[in-house]
Amino acid sequence: MRAVWLKEFGGPEVLVGGDAPDPDPGPGQVLVEVVFANITFVETQFRSGRPGPFRTELPVIPGNGVGGVVSAAGPGVDGEFVGKMVVTATGGSGGYAQRVVVDAAGVFEVPEGLALDNAVALLADGRTATGLVNAAEIKPGERVLVEAAAGGVGSLLVQLAKAAGAEVIALAGGARKVGGLHDLGADLAFDYRELGWAEQAGPIDVVFDGVGGEVGTAAFKLLRRGGRMVVFGLASGSWTEIPDGDAEARGVSVVRGIGDPAEFAGFTRSALAEAAAGRLRPVIGQRFPLERAADAHAAIESRGTIGKTLLVV
């Protein structure tokens, strides 16, 4: 089968297409014919050799989230899985390939009415955004600031926060990205590269911090007493520095992560169901053929992408 290999850490160019053995499903597993593979920012960090959640020895086929059709089931798996359109995670590797083997227990059937590419775009980001909104406990009428609002997670946070009854202030880098934020439901949208955005944004109840660095610090200062700073990303390259004393003195809660891992599957199912019902819309800004995984990584690292980036297998 066709696949993309990572044989050494480095820039995007170290991702090289090649052949790989066809996998066979073992007990409790299914074989998925991959149609789309999801790319995350974390995967670009892994490829470059930075510490992260994925630990493995090289060479390896990278990629974690995929969508496709189940073509075979291993021993102990209900044969009804075969032929189903599903999305699933591989456990951190193997996703940039024509076929993957995964545990049947971790497979999510794509709801009727939801396109497979949209389901793949929601697999990781939908779970994350749903979990973050749940952790933030947004109340109707609160003012919510979403950083990196044109990204995969951020674009979903804008929609979910609006659905929760919040006034949504969205931040993105560059006019092209800012231009589409109102369509997602943002009440106000600002370019965080422009001076004065913080003064225009005004006091905030909840910040979804996906940028970090100076932007995250400026957003933290806007929080009212009793506000929540939900930290989930570092698009700037560094996490927001929030001294514990400062948060406590201002009565601000700092939330990191999306909660109990036991809830993650429920967050994924909720995002898929909301999308199937037409209440949540993932933004897929870029698609690349499998063989151009290196170009996809380069595009993400350039910070010029909008929404989700998918590999078309």
Image (cartoon, helix red, strand yellow):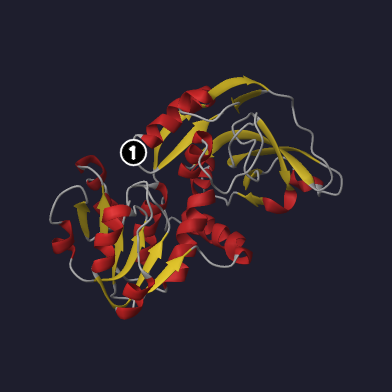
Residue plotted at (16% across, 57% down): 197
Q: Residues within 10 Å of mark 1 (few under 14, many from 20)?
A: few
Residue 162 seen from this side: no
Q: Is residue 38 above or below residue 5?
A: below
Give left or right: position of 124 versus 141: right
Image quarter of residue 267:
bottom right
| Residue situated in front as seen by the camera: 27 or 272 | 27
Give left or right: position of 200 versus 5: left
Tally of numbered tags: 1
Residue 46 seen from this side: yes
> Residue 161's x, y, as percent?
36, 65
> Residue 125's x, y, as percent?
48, 51
> Residue 309's x, y, as percent?
44, 38
Residue identified by numbered label 1: 303
Residue plotted at (64% across, 50% down): 109
**Residue sitting at the far top:** 18
- As helix, strand or loop, the secondary structure at mark 1 comes to loop
Image quarter of residue 74:
top right
**Amino acid type indicated by mark 1:** Arg
Instruction: Specify the quadrant that holds the N terminus.
Output: top right
Instruction: Specify the quadrant that holds the C terminus.
Output: top right
> Residue 261's x, y, as percent?
61, 63
Q: Is residue 248 above or below residue 64?
A: below
| Residue situated in front as seen by the camera: 257 or 117 | 257
Q: Is residue 114 above or below residue 163?
A: above
